[in-house]
Image (spheres, rainbow, N blue to C red):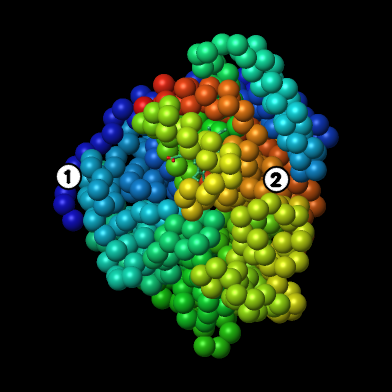
Amino acid sequence: MKRRCHQAAPLHASLRLSFDSNTTYLEKTTMKRPLFFGITAALTIGWASAQAADMSAGKTMFADACAQCHGPTGKGMASFPSLRGRDTDYIESRLKQYRAGERVGANSSLMIPNAANLSDDDIANLAAYIAENFD
Amino acid sequence: MSQKPTIRPFCAVLASAAIIGVPATATSSTDTPELSHTTVLSDLENPWDMAFLPDGTMFFTEKCRGLSVRLPDGEVNNLLGMEGTEGYATTTDDLVCQGQAGMNGVAIDPDFDENRTIYVYSASSMSDPRTNRVLRLKVNSDVSNVSDRTDIVDDIAYKPAPTDHPFGDAGAHNGGRIRFDRDGRFLYVTTGDTHNGEVPQSPTRLGSKVLRIDRDGKAAEGNNPPEGFDPRTFTYGHRNVQGLTFHPKTGQPIVTEHGPWHSDEVNALVNGGNSGWDPRPNMAGRGDCPDDYCGYEPNQNEGMDPKERAAYMPLTDTETYPDALQPAWKNNNLSQGISGADFLTGDQWGAWNGRLLVGFMGIGFGGTPVGQRISMIDIAEDGLSVNDVAEMPLPMGSARFRSIVQGPDGDLFVAVDEGAIYRITPE
């Protein structure tokens, strides 16, 4: 089962898109983590010495780990805030706050786990991608 | 009400999306269809619900914009706009949105041909404090405007101010699905607990209830709630019901109920039943809770084993309420944003004919997998258990599945928070 028709297919798309029973579904979703971090790690190492943010790593990571709440174009959905019109500094500092476990708004507990494992490079890449593309 | 006739012709262009086939590599059953999809509408803002006429005309709501209609030729007319909107034939400033509240469900009168009547559920500032209302509206002959608004229910609970809870903004736990039963006799209305500890078991406050009413908003004949309850009550003690449909064979109403960091439920309703949600403080072994609502206890901000949560703050408390309605399914004790529901019917769906479809928007709190998907549930005819649960192989990928409605020709329509309505066709 392959997804053939999605513009920004997240890494785990083909894993999630099974129509197995729920139990299998859970196994498959948890697989997402090692795969996701494996790839991120590879990208991060590749850019370790680079100064500029890696937009394409930011894009991949956003599609994989952020879009399901903030929307594919960062415009926000339901209780999840829009990320549009934010500059790089703002996004970076917010992500660092969440990474440190700081509560910002009423729903910080939903965001904190998503920032907990981000590296400084991840944050720089995400912030650059979001600020550049969602204005 | 200001009158401004307008249309949104650009949506017709957007609607002409390509059909993309996706091979459904069937697992166990041989008789499963392959699915393809088209994008019916995109660039919507939080589309929340839709309702169809037999010719394919689709009324739909957007939570902070209002009511629109897509005609069979693809043209979109904006009918009833909420506070602050532009471009609607009629704009009504008392219809407001905040948090999870706004314009939610839409239903078409079964006698639409004769009475041209539709119904919507919306938050309104006409009362102070705000309430949710069910509006009855007449659609004009060329389906470009609505008139004759009558609020047939004006006292549904609404959360007026933020509280110290997850999703704690005003407007939370707002219910909002409305559907006519399969006989076309009564309108069912789902409501939420509004993050208020007292509401679920309250006999008089219209939250956490499924109401059953006639077209004038009067209690349906035969409603059987306990003595002292508002007679419009069909069932009570729910947390937040956003999915509502009726069993294709038995006609029994079936709802989905958002779980409290654990256990989303599918419940088949029995007239007068208590769904067993009681988040009051100092109840069932619990002490004080933030803002007198224990709905996310014992620990509202950190991950924890859902089973432990379920033991402490059950969605269906059978110890306190031994006669409570038993869920048919509890999503493996997980809370993943269960929302719209409908039955798939028709031979073109092969082995899936008769399955209950349930949409998940996904949450991803505290180690629970996000879970965005549409589940296909083979629910027992008595509504008390499930025989099988499988995941629908979706040609357009996963999203926040808010509303699921089978259209008049048997295709499936799904609205996602991302801002689109898709049509899924079996081959």
Mark 1 and mark 2: span between their CA atoms?
A: 49 Å
Instruction: From the image, tell me which residue sits under label 1.
Output: B4
Q: Quadrant of residue A26?
A: top right
| Residue situated furthest bottom in the rendering | B227
Q: Position of residue A109 (x, y in %)?
A: 58, 49
Judge by depth and name the residue closer to the eye, B20 or B282. B282
Residue at horizontal 68%, vertical 51%? Answer: B303
* Mark 2 residue type: Gly
Instruction: Say the numbered circle drawn on residue B367.
Output: 2
Q: Secondary structure at mark 1?
A: loop
Q: Quadrant of residue B349?
A: top right
Taking the image as drawn, is residue B406 in sight? no
Answer left or right for B45 relative to B296: left
The chain under label 2 reads: B
Judge by depth and name the residue closer to the eye, B254 or B129. B129
Answer left or right for A103 relative to B278: left
Q: How many marks?
A: 2
Q: Earlier in the sequence, mark 1 or mark 2?
A: 1
Q: Position of residue B415 (x, y in %)?
A: 50, 41
Using the image, determine if residue A65 lies above or below residue B373: above
